[in-house]
Amino acid sequence: MDIFWFLPVYGDGPYLGSQVDSRPATLSYLKQIAQTADRRGYHGVLVPCGKACEEPYIVSAALIEATERLRFLVATRPSALTPTFAARLATGLDRLSGGRFYLNVVAGGDADELAGDGVFLDHDARYAHAAEFFTVWKRVLAGETVDFDGQHISVRGAAVPLTPVQQPHPKLFFGGSSPAGHAAVAEHFDTYLTWAEPPDAVAAKIADVRARASAHGRTLSYGLRVNIIVRETEAEAWAAAETLVSKIDRAAVDAAHTAFRRFESEGQRRMTELAARDDLVVSPNLWAGVGLVRGGAGTALVGSARQVADRLLEYRDLGIDAFVLSGYPHLEEAERVADLLFPLLPVTAPPPAAQTAPEVAFVSPFTGLQPVRSAS
Ligand SMILES: Cc1cc2nc3c(=O)[nH]c(=O)nc-3n(C[C@H](O)[C@H](O)[C@H](O)COP(=O)(O)O)c2cc1C
């Protein structure tokens, strides 16, 4: 199992929906979390994107030197970038980190926020755009000089001479639960990520994506994004869950759910539906209380170490091998999860970083010659 942690690039604290004892996302705080995850043997950290987030490419670049093996799973909305520029960001982060960079492709679900970025594509068009975008992105990272005329993307002579460490390109994760999302991941991306729904629902999603991928002759890997509330005993864990939501009032829940229902996101619709239930325990040890006010990953596995480990192993048996975990506050909970859960799970240690980036026979642009791609 590759276990990732989460970088709260919009800040965090011990209570959901409250400023009490909250912590801003300073570089110092994010560095402490990243270094804890690195030291404890997490494979990587997911760095989310959005208008309230410190930009994940920048955060990850700032933390490369502070960490040794930790991978950065950088969320990106392709519609806010061009594919050639995104490929340059990718190869830059990959080379400077010694191959410790992955991308989490997210189309985005908030039309208002996307409009603020100048993106007016509708839900399914965002996936059609992403498909063209990553067709170009992969080709330039493979060393091609690309001319492309699509419905959404056009480039002439697009090229990225600096070769990424990870060949043919850094791994592409993907999050999206709609039919258009499943179609996109099946054809273009490597790892399908889902927020934690009950195991039977997750199994159905995996079966759908797997069938679509095999129609393209492709095999994907699968990942689960879930919060963790683990303690020595089950009773302590449920008490911690109650404390986490103890400062939320009904009006805050209503306001959050009104906002979530406006989103063009099947994944968010499914999370909000779970958090609107009277009984928030939606399957054994799976609690939808985080989704009372938090968008995105709204469920948590709550229980003793043995219970939470067993639930994670159940998801593993469905075909999941990447687990993106989190807990509040993220610094202390990264330690606690490693203390209590890692001894009970087959955690795969991340490989060391590459010490050198592929060489590029680079001719100075001042000579008027083009840079030449190395043969590696
Ligand atoms: C694991 C996971 C992580 C995500 N992270 C982000 C993120 O960082 N920023 C963002 O805007 N959307 C994020 N999303 C949401 C996707 O953008 C969202 O699922 C999509 O816009 C709506 O897709 P759907 O209708 O196919 O579910 C994430 C989704 C998943 C499953």
Image (cartoon, rainbow, N blue to C red):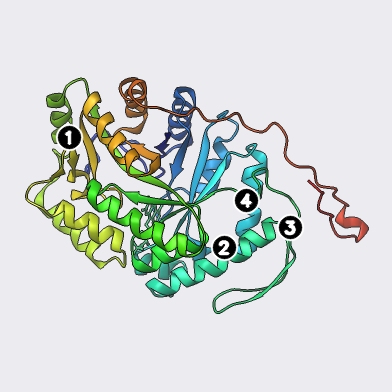
Residue of label 3 = 143
Front-most of 320 and 117? 320
Ligand 1 within 8 angstroms of badge 3 C-beta: no
Q: Amino acid at mark 3?
A: Gly
- Say if residue 82 shows up in the picture: no
Callout in the foreground (1, 4): 4
Marks 4/2: CA–CA distance:
11 Å
Q: Nearer the viewer, mark 3 or mark 1?
A: 3
Which residue corresponds to mark 4?
169
Q: Secondary structure at mark 3?
A: loop
Q: Earlier in the sequence, mark 2 or mark 3?
A: 2
Residues at marks 2 and 3, CA–CA distance in whole angstroms: 14 Å
Q: Quadrant of residue 330?
A: top left
Instruction: Point out the image quarter for the N terminus.
Output: top left
Counting from the top left corner in percent of width and height, residue 144 is at: 73, 62
Mark 2: is the Cβ under 8 angstroms from ligand 1? Answer: no
Amino acid under label 1? Ala
- Amino acid on which disc 4 is placed: His
Q: Residue at x 63, y 56 (%)?
A: 87
- Which image quadrant is residue 140 in? bottom right
Q: Mark 1 sits on what residue?
A: 241
Of the two numbered discs 4 and 2 on the same chain, state the one appearing first in sequence: 2
Residue under the point 85% across and 49% down: 362
Q: CA distance from mark 1 to mark 4?
A: 40 Å
Residue 339 - label: none
- For label 2, the residue is 134
Could you tell whether 279 is left or right of 202 in the image?
Answer: left
Above or below, 128 relative to 15: below
